[in-house]
Amino acid sequence: MRKLLEGMRKAREASLLLATLETGVKDAALREAAKAVRDHRAELLEANRKDVEAAERRRLSKPLLDRLKLSEAKLEAISRMIESVADLEDPVGRTLYACELDEGLELYRVSCPIGVVGAIFESRPDVLPQISSLCLKSGNAVVLKGGREATRSNRAFFQILKEATEGKGVPEGWMQLVEGREEVHRLLKLEEYVDLLVPRGSKEFIKFIQRNTRIPVLGHAEGVCHVYVDEHADFDKALQICYDAKVQYPAVCNAAEKVLVHAKVAEEFLPRLVEMYSKAGVEVRGCERTRRFVEVKRAREEDWRAEYLDLIIAVKVVDHVEEAISHINRYGSKHTDAIVTEDRETAIKFMEGVDSSSVMWNASTRFSDGYRYGLGAEVGISTGKLHARGPVGLEGLTTYKYYLVGRGHVVAPYLSSPPRPFLHRKLDRTWREVREGRA
Amino acid sequence: MRKLLEGMRKAREASLLLATLETGVKDAALREAAKAVRDHRAELLEANRKDVEAAERRRLSKPLLDRLKLSEAKLEAISRMIESVADLEDPVGRTLYACELDEGLELYRVSCPIGVVGAIFESRPDVLPQISSLCLKSGNAVVLKGGREATRSNRAFFQILKEATEGKGVPEGWMQLVEGREEVHRLLKLEEYVDLLVPRGSKEFIKFIQRNTRIPVLGHAEGVCHVYVDEHADFDKALQICYDAKVQYPAVCNAAEKVLVHAKVAEEFLPRLVEMYSKAGVEVRGCERTRRFVEVKRAREEDWRAEYLDLIIAVKVVDHVEEAISHINRYGSKHTDAIVTEDRETAIKFMEGVDSSSVMWNASTRFSDGYRYGLGAEVGISTGKLHARGPVGLEGLTTYKYYLVGRGHVVAPYLSSPPRPFLHRKLDRTWREVREGRA
């Protein structure tokens, strides 16, 4: 416990220094980190080999072993990923709002790091370099807790990245590695030391974290995504979207798990949908009304909440768009839902009425992704509503603070009678110009 | 408990409808509410008179009684406040980001309500109409829990506002009134039903709430604000700011509680500061080094953390700006802190190094306020770092969602080899134009 607290204090101290680091220093350190991963690849592969051997002895499943295993190619991809983070625009120091409160009294709202980010993840060792790079770029200290299977790989990455970056002007202690299950439980209680948790892993893992901490958690436990095929849908678009959203990659959070079909088109659309899904090996489970038109398994109540992450889909017939909206708001996970329709008014009603982080109109749910959305790197997808929602870019690791610059201004004149009025005039100047003396 | 859950369910349902209300409907309902307060003033004053009598029998302190008591003038001010909320720009439906992902595939990030806001407040009955108006304007349902002393006043406001607004197209159940201490404890556990808590009251009250819920809390428990007088300070500005920040209104969260003075100017500045404060009736408590130059009480360790909210101030001599920064980051409350200096570099170092929601350069800490910052109505001042920080305007009661509009787009072509590239081109169109068919 003492060691944990010691590390957390160091991370907090480092975070205060990180907040003021110049972009150039952070980017140089990131490039150094990318180089260090290349230079130490033998060491990394050796540590990983031991992890993989231990995991094989404990008979880990094939998919888990695949995720655990590093290779020369994976390491090179990691180095490139770190370099691509260096190439991103600095999310810190951006002027988000500037206002002249009165003559010579200027207010700036400027983006800044959050402080200390806690990253808790399961077996994939490439999460460590990824989340560390994103934190460094955004000026946050990071406390890392990886899965037991990857202990040696994580230690190796940690040492290599720490040495590469701390040597380059980045404050000592900005990265902390935490090991052991008990330490996680302790970490979850340390709300004074950790400002934000970014967990990666299974939905059970994320739910466990959400239920056991008061620290804000950025992420999502599951994606129960819907495609609603409206009475005014173009069937070709609907079939393409239903196919893409389910079949293209069923194991991901933005894959569709349910199709809702308007009653007026159910008889015509459902046979085509089921034929298409059957050819693709998708098991269809239908509500009573669906089963009047197609021969499929019966969907049970629990099917409406299920996240299969597999070639299974549940289909329900609804009477109108309002029923589709309320079904989604009741059973969905507020992740991503889509409507297929040629009718603008129905589309708007659906999009504004569905309480999810992303709502698609005539597009696949699978677009819900930070890279595809043009946000640069993706920190995660949030189904929470506060701070950041939906696919979250580097911006999600920042907050803002206000800078007020005066010439000795005091509030008294603005509160006397008659009070001096405020100007509240939009300013085109940026904080960067002020700090560089250009203003 | 059943009644509470019933109400919370209604609030959640109403919130989904509120999210899609047109600005005109919300504003008309607000004007109706303002009128209803005027029309029912006799009823409101009568209910309030009974609260005040009961409070007098229970010998409530004079300041508490003053805060509890309504008058014709106070009611008129409340009506005007509601009208001024109607006049504010709608914070919902703003396009925050728009990007053409590919030909005909358009992404919009649009502001929307959070959902259900829980407002828990102490004796002042004017909080109920204020927070309700802000919630309606921002499209949020609101669950209200007022202080016991104001039970009858709160019931009267609640009935009047509910009838006035629900009659005007606002969904039934959008306002819920909760009574009784046990219900608060239950409310704090209902994280599925409440998206954000906005508490108002004493610091003990707010700390109690923060410690007893997993629902995000917007607000601050205390303001331990500092003024740092640098070696390059203009003494006249420093004295004016120290005076204004402490004396102008000592009972508020953005009043200064500490003055830090650079060692190089301590001998010259401290006598002038203490003389000024003595004339204003401010008790000064100094560190050892301060007491070498001026005769003042000794400051103890607990003085550095104290929020006096009174005519008391603690003064410390520091060796350099770095010591000032680390003192503030250690003992402050991340609310508002100021530096007085003519040296730009020192100012920048201080502003970027102090981890507070507002940092002032040559201006009083008392400017830290939503109205003064030009944010329109103030929802609260947040010392938390996520979601909203510092003085929070109506925007703090909103989040955003993504709308993606395609023409049947699916992800498969972007993942094939060679992959179809994304355009990621900035769009100048707004969601409002799309929904009105103008795009």
Image: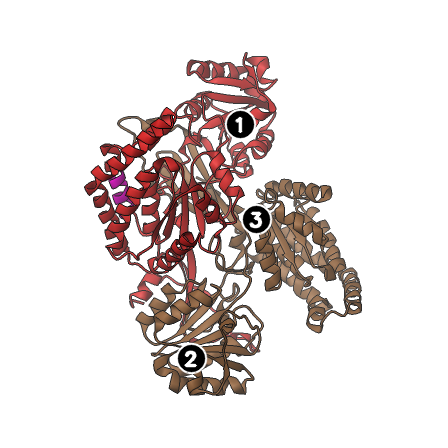
Chain colours: A brown, B red
Q: Which quadrant of the structure image shows residue A415? A: top left
For the N terminus of chain A, give its image quadrant. Answer: top right
Residue visible at 27% across and 32% down in the picture = B49
First to last magenta residue range: B78-86
Q: Is residue A129 left or right of residue B63?
A: right
Furthest residue to the left?
B39
Which of pointers 2 and 3 indicates the residue nearer the eye? 3
Q: Is residue B140 left or right of residue A281?
A: left
What residue is shown with label 3? A215
Asked whether the residues under marks 2 and 1 belong to the same chain, the reply is no
Other-residue count near label 1 (Cα within 10 Å), few / some / many at <14 / 14–19 / ≥20? some
Task: Residue type at mark 1: give it.
Answer: Ala
Q: Main secondary structure of the magenta part?
A: helix
In the structure shown, which secondary structural element does the residue marked by tag 1 occupy? loop
What residue is shown with label 2? A238
**Distance between the Cα atoms at labels 2 and 3?**
41 Å
Q: Is residue B80 magenta?
A: yes
Task: Residue type at mark 3: give it.
Answer: Ile
For the C terminus of chain A, give its image quadrant. Answer: top left
